[in-house]
């Protein structure tokens, strides 16, 4: 299941099909869950499931913009570095919230890690001294959480594309997604996936029922187990809706979890 926010069994339970389910019903529910999950992730703009990521920054080329000169100091000397005036001391990673950073390295000739010997151990930076995530929360394990994914630097971040390599863990735990954590409640994300999955399944079943019965008007009641059918489930799976299709009430549930992008890195 993509991203693993919700399980198929949870969708079937919501539909009242947890005890007995046909292969066609399972296939349609599985496809509805896949599309609904994709729609929610697309709306959030990140994968909300706790996982580890390795990313390279900047992902835009700022070097053609206006230039500024800044002084930097190494262990043995001070020197001037030229940077785009649009580069700042803030970098925002793709996935939120940040739970920990395993490694952050800066190699001005790193080339997104494709050059031999790039991002050697000597390019490793120290959290707290060279950079620090914008921690704004302590989770139930007494660990710091950076909700907006912003990492600040002692100086300006490089403007050479692919010169910063970050390995970090971000997202919400299974307990947080199920509303079982004492500090962080991310259950609206799970609820949104389940609501959208069920809605898509019911839409397909409604169309199937109308086609079988010849009824063309609106259905006022639904009972998935009251009728049988024999058809290619792949045809009906195409009717579950698109990856951009979310109800306004679902968007409202998800609103406080949406990533607000910065036009910095």
Image: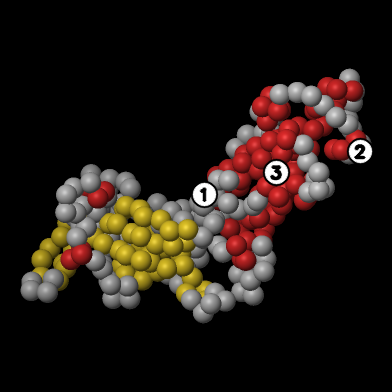
Packing grade of label 1 (10 A; few <14, some 14-19, many >=20) is: some
Front position among marks 1 and 2: 2
Residue shown at 35%/53% (left/top)? 55
Residue 177: give x, y in percent of width and height. Answer: 63, 61
Distance (Cα) linking label 1 and label 2: 36 Å
> From the viewer's perspective, is residue 53 above or below residue 179?
above
Which badge, 1 or 2, comes first in the chain's sequence? Answer: 1
> From the viewer's perspective, is residue 224 above or below residue 171?
above
Residue shown at 87%/38% (left/top)? 225
Residue 87: give x, y in percent of width and height. Answer: 29, 56
Residue positioned most to the top: 214
Q: Which residue is mark 1?
A: 45
Which badge, 2 or 3, comes first in the chain's sequence? Answer: 3
Position of residue 235 in the picture relative to residue 85 (left or right): right
Residue 96: give x, y in percent of width and height. Answer: 49, 59
Distance (Cα) linking label 2 and label 3: 19 Å
Q: Which residue is mark 3?
A: 197
Callout 2 secondary element: loop
């Amino acid at each position: 299941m993509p991203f693993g926010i919700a399980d198929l069994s949870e969708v079937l339970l919501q539909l009242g099909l947890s005890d007995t389910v046909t292969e066609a019903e399972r296939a349609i529910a599985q496809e509805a869950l896949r599309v609904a999950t994709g729609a929610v992730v697309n709306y959030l703009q990140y994968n909300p499931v706790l996982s580890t990521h390795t990313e390279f920054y900047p992902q835009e080329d700022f070097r053609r913009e206006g230039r500024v000169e800044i002084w930097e100091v190494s262990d043995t000397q001070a020197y001037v570095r030229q940077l785009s005036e649009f580069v700042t001391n803030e970098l925002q990673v793709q996935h939120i919230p940040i739970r920990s950073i395993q490694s952050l390295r800066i190699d001005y000739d790193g080339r997104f890690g494709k050059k031999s010997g790039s991002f050697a151990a000597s390019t490793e930076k120290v959290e707290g001294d060279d950079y620090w995530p914008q921690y704004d929360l302590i989770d139930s394990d007494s660990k710091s959480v950076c909700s907006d994914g912003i990492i600040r630097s002692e100086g300006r971040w490089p403007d050479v594309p692919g010169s910063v390599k970050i390995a970090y863990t971000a997202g919400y735990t299974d307990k947080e997604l199920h509303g079982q954590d004492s500090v962080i409640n991310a259950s609206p994300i799970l609820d949104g996936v389940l609501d959208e999955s069920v809605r898509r399944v019911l839409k397909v079943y409604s169309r199937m029922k109308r086609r079988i019965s010849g009824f063309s008007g609106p259905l006022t009641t639904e009972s998935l187990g009251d009728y049988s059918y024999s058809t290619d489930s792949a045809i009906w799976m195409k009717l579950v809706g698109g990856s951009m299709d979310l109800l306004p009430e679902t968007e409202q549930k998800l609103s406080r979890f949406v990533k607000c992008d910065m036009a910095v890195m």
